[in-house]
Each structure stands twice: as structure tokens, then as C-alpha cells.
Amino acid sequence: MLTLIASTQSNAQEDATWSGQIACIIYSHCSTCHNDGGIAPFSLMSYEDAQASRFAIQHVVTNRIMPPWPPDPSYNRLAHERLLSDEEVSLIDEWVKADAPAGDLANAPQAPIFETNLEISQPDMELNLPIFTVPQDAGEDVYRCFVIPTDEDEDRFITGMEIIPGNRNIVHHVLVYQDTTGVPEALDAADPGVGYTCFGGIGSDGARLVSGWVPGGTAYFTPPRMGVFLPAGANLIVQIHYPEGSEGQVDSTKINLQLSDDMGLRRMENLPLLNHITSIDRWLIIPANTQQTFYQEFTVPFNLSITGIAPHAHLLCTSMTAFAVRPNGDTIPLIHIPKWDFEWQGFYNFRNPIRLPFGTRLHGIATYDNTAENPNNPNDPPQLVTLGEATTDEMMLFFTPVTFYFAGDENIVIDDSEHPDHHDDCQLQGTTSSDDQKRSESLKIYPNPFAHSITVESESTSESFILVISDLFGHEVARLEGFQGLRKIQTSDLFPGLYILNVLDRHGNYIRSSRKLVKL
Ligand code: HEC
């Protein structure tokens, strides 16, 4: 018995090599940020890079500090989670303990290439922000707003938005608003240079938040049949936060939009349903040398669906939580951020839209530590901090993309993958996860429900698949063979109803469990 255990262990140690497993883990889960020009301070793009930082990697991975993902997955599972599996964490741990063996480098996966990594590579609208140089004498955080005319003659819907920071070393966050009031133009005209200074908000009450970007952020897509309304002639107002230390640096951020002319889309609004007005017992006032917890509650006035959540606070905050209680007493966890981090604020999507029937009570909880013990406290010694837009003030908001509820909303799939897609479909050699599962995970099929077309996207350039769509009687209604990359299947001819999708490898073997598709 003892020998058996010993031999299993030594096998496991032998197994963990850069070429066998670790390259795949690092390239899939780390290199997106840890590359030349990426937002992380050093590259993880080769065996040498990883070997040199192995102890730091072991530390951040086993303590789950990296990849950065502040929400607690045991509270609520979200879409597009940036998490390592337990197996991946222990492989990295074993690898470092075994002195980081390279294995057969000739067989290691190729390092990813990032120039071509845009998610919206053929945008319907491409917006280039003016070139902005952070003033040499700024001496503090700079919040700059840029007014970008869309020059559209007709109303449209935004269904996808990708923000491409120009200078990733200094772009800390980007918020994009839609505005038709003309106020931001006046603010811009009154402020010398390109754009205008804007702390927290953008200075226009009529502006509507579309979405945003934070370090590690990916493109934002609205769920199927939904969009953010973009009225004819609207301006996009883009707020960018350049942190202290960006003085003299230059940025020109880009925004790629995917638009729809379909006026039948459902309108979404990104609203702070939980905000300062909904505080229940007292205003956001945090005396020096105290820790305080604040509560917000909001009763939903219509039948609504929410598709995601973006909690927002500043430096003193230590944790944020939101949940909903339906009129029948069901409690729905929405998000829990146990260690609030001002630098890693996210726009999180739920795996499926969440139904909030009329009378549902939304609850928000946030804790703030205004003592000298809080290393993020901007004041030394601590000072009274109240509600305000400067980074040194505090806030408590939960933004939620929201729309009126339609029957079946909770069945719309925003993302249901168990694990993020791996770079180039790479697999961990000698581990239990099946190759097939890995391959099918790298296939994206959307939207579902669908109307006129389905898009199938394969990240792999080496694998090819066969896709078969059948009706409920097993009759094949569409087939796509030998494709790679991105393809659209026209589905206008199909009757509304339920269909089954199967994915086969190029030899005709089924490689993923059937999936239901709904034609509207
Ligand atoms: C979403 C972007 C992102 C991803 C993904 C990511 N990192 Fe990082 N990493 C950063 C940034 C940014 C920093 C700089 C410190 C910070 O801002 O938290 C960092 C810092 C680090 C550090 C230094 C930690 C320290 O305390 O100085 C290590 C080590 C590290 N990352 C390893 C990894 C590993 C290993 C992975 C994959 C398992 C990974 N990172 C994934 C963005 C990322």
C-alpha cells in the first residue's frame, strides 16, 4: 500500500513539466495579461520567463491571487470566470516543488500571439479617441472624458463593445456612456486640450452607461435579442482613469462597436439599481478610525431580468455583496467580493439572466475600513470620509444591465463553460480531463435563442469540426463541415422551436454532449 502511494506521487511529480502541462496552463490563463505590452508588469511567454518567476508563480497560484478574479465562486458562479481548476493549481505547485522541469521543449505548445486577439475584429463602427498626453504636472490621478460623435443618422443598438486601451501601462479603467444632452460638448469646449477633466461621473445627468473596461476586461456582448439603444446623433462619452505616475505618457484608446439595425431588439439599460438613495439606515459617512457596514435595499417595481452586475466603491471598501429575495422567499445570490480591490473592478455577467419578479427585494452590503490598519487608506492619519466622486471619497453602487422580463429569459445562456477555453486547445498531458471536452470547450455557439443566424466560433486553427443541427425527430436541418475560425449558419428557413446541436470531429465521432438550441 505504502509503495503504491509513493509511486503515484513520484509519477505525479514526473508528470508535471513545462512541455507537458505547465506551458498550457500559463499560456491559457496568464499570458493574456503577462505579455509584452500586456497589463501585467512582466511577461510569462516562455519557459525561461516562467522558470525565472517560479516561486512567485507558486505563491500567487496556490493562494489564488492570480489570475485575478475577486468574486467568490462558492457564492455564485458567473460567466467567463477567470479561475484555475484545483488540478491546475496542484500541477503548478508540484512543478515548482520539482524544480520546474522543462520536459521536451520541442513538444511544448507554441506561445500565443496577441496582436490578432481582438474579439470584434470586423467592427460596424470604429472609434479612435484623440491622442492624449497626461500633463507633466498632473501629480495625481487623472480622470479625462472624451466626447466622440457617432454621426449616425438612424437609431441603432449596440450589441457588442470592445475597448482597446492604447497605452496599457497607464489606462486603468474606461467607462463608456451614451449621451444626447450636449452637456459634455460644452464641458469639453470649456476645458483646454483634448477632452475635459471628470472625476467619478462624467458631468451629464442624462448620460447612460453602456459598459466599461478594467484590467483584464474582455469585450462586452449583450445577451441574444437584447441591445443598448444608441439614438441617432448620440455622442459616446469615454471616461479614462490614468493613475498617478502616468505624467508625460501618451494614450489613444480605441473602441470597436458591433451594432444592430434590428429595432425589434429588447432595450437594456445599465442602471445602479442599488445606490446611495436606496441606503436603508444611514448615509455613507465613515468616521476616522472606524469600520462600518452599510446596507441598501430596493424593491423591484416591474418584472425585470438582470444579466450581470458591477459593484463599485473606492479605496476604503473591504467587501461587497448583493443578493435578491423574491416575493416567494427564494434568495438568489448575485455577487460576493470578499476582498474588495479598487484596481480590479469588473463588469460581471451572470451565466443566465436572472428573473426579478415584481416585488423582489434587492439587497446590497458593503464594509469599509477607515482605520490605519487598512493599507489602502488614502489618509494618514485617517480622516472622515463621505460620499463623493474623488478616489479619496467613497461610493457604494451596484450597476446591473436590466431589461423587462420575458418568459424564458432564465434559459438564455450567456456562458455555461465549466472552465475557460485553453490557448490553441492545448491539453494537460496525462491528466483526467478528456481531450474531447477540452476541444468542445473552445467552440462558441451563439446566440441562443437564435433568429436569422447562428455564429460558430472555433479558437483553434489546427482542429476542424463538423456541426450538425437536427430537429426533435432527429432530421438533420443544417450541417457545417470542416470549418475553422468563425462561421455563420443562416437559419431564416427554420421553423421556430427546439433544435439539437451535435459536434463531431473530422472523422465523424461525437465530441460533445448534445446541446439544445431555440429558434425564435
Ligand atoms: C487579467 C490579467 C492577469 C492575469 C490573467 C494574470 N495576471 Fe498576474 N498580474 C497581473 C497584474 C496587473 C499584476 C501586477 C500586480 C497587480 O496589479 O495585482 C500581476 C502580478 C503577478 C505576479 C506578481 C505578484 C506580486 O505580488 O508582485 C505574479 C507572480 C503573477 N502575476 C503571476 C500570474 C500567473 C501565474 C497567472 C496565471 C495563473 C497570472 N498572473 C494571471 C495581471 C494578470
Image (cartoon, grey):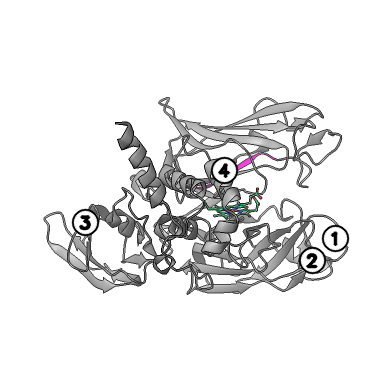
The residue indicated by pointer 4 is 70
Q: Circle 1 sits on which residue? A: 138
> Which label's residue is closer to the chain start, 3 or 1?
1
Q: Are marks 2 and 1 in contact (CB under 8 Å)?
A: yes
Q: Amino acid at mark 2?
A: Val
Q: Please, what is the three-letter code of the amino acid marked with disc 4?
A: Pro
Bounds of the magenta segment? 395-402
**Numbered mark located on residue 499 in the image:** 3
Q: Kindly state the secondary structure of the residue where label 2 is placed.
A: loop
Q: Looking at this view, name the residue that lies furthest to the front.
A: 3
Note whether residue 346 is visible: no
What residue is drawn where x is 81% and y is 71%?
A: 193
Q: Quadrant of the C terminus?
A: bottom left
**Crowding at mark 3 (Cα within 10 Å: few <14, some 14-19, many 20+):** many
Q: Label 2: which residue? A: 134
Is ligand 1 within 8 Å of the beta carbon of the residue shown at mark 4? no
Q: Residue at x 83, y 66 (%)?
A: 135
Residue 136 magenta-highlighted: no
